[in-house]
Amino acid sequence: MPVPDPTRIYPPVYGPNYGRAQGWPVVFLKPLVESPFTEVGEYTYYADPADPTGFERNNVLFHYGPDKLVIGRYTAIARDVRFLMGAANHLMGGFSTYPFPMFGGDWMALMDQFGARSFRGDTVVGNDVWLGYQALVMPGVRIGDGTIVAARAVVAADLPPYSIAAGNPARVVRHRFTEDQIGRLLKLAWWDWPPEHVTRHLAAITGDDLDALEAVAP
């Protein structure tokens, strides 16, 4: 079984057994990244019927640095997921939050003060994460490996690995596995396996037998 082409746009699936088209055009993001402030791992994809290749332009907002957006491997990003980056922040320590220097002229005198506004650091999304439809990820949060973020959730704080989070602000609804199982999964880190090895053992990776998965680790 060949490994999928990371440079291809994958269209919806048509056929007599499907009826209407299933899914939307999807793209692997790594080959499309242009910003020096964005890092995306292999086989992480974005799905969008309108503009699947416009992820950085449409979905990563106020991405001027210095903070980075770092996304791991094999992460699934649904349509209209947005990442709000740190440059969106306004000054909050004084009486007014208005961004005067953005408009030039004499207001530029406050640029140094405006440039020193608070940044929470990089936004980091782990491996094998599923970000649901229209989820919003706020600046500087960290989403652990294997986490599921529900549709329209607003992630304003860190989420632990293999959790399921929903709501505004997003809260952990439950953990997908026991603490011991999560530790074993993180140690396995199947997303770091060679793609050919992943392909040979998809049944174990997508199954629920942790012993079987450990048995095929390279």
Image (cartoon, rainbow, N blue to C red):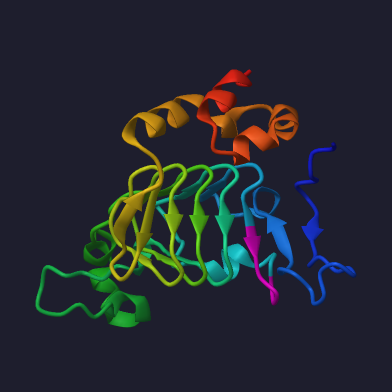
The answer to whether one can see residue 141 in this image is: no
Numbered-mark total: 0
Closest to the observer, 6 or 97: 6
- The quadrant where residue 34 appears: bottom right
Quarter residue 32 falls in: bottom right
Q: Nearer the viewer, residue 109 or 204?
A: 204
Q: Taking 23 as reference, is 161 above or below it?
A: above
Q: Residue at x 43, y 26 (%)?
A: 184
- State the image coordinates of residue 94 (x, y, percent, origin top left): 10, 72
What x and y, as percent, mark residue 15? Answer: 88, 68
Judge left or right: residue 95 versus residue 49: left
Q: Residue at x 40, y 31 (%)?
A: 181
Residue 193 vertical position relative to residue 45 in the rendered view, above or below: above
Q: Is residue 47 magenta?
A: yes
Residue stretch in magenta: 46-51
- Tell me which residue sits at (35%, 69%) in the image: 88
> Is residue 167 depicted above or below 197 in this figure?
below
Which percent across, then down, holds residue 36?
54, 49
Which quadrant holds the N terminus? top right
State whether the magenta stretch is mostly helix, strand or loop: loop
In the image, residue 204 lies in the stretch drawn in magenta: no
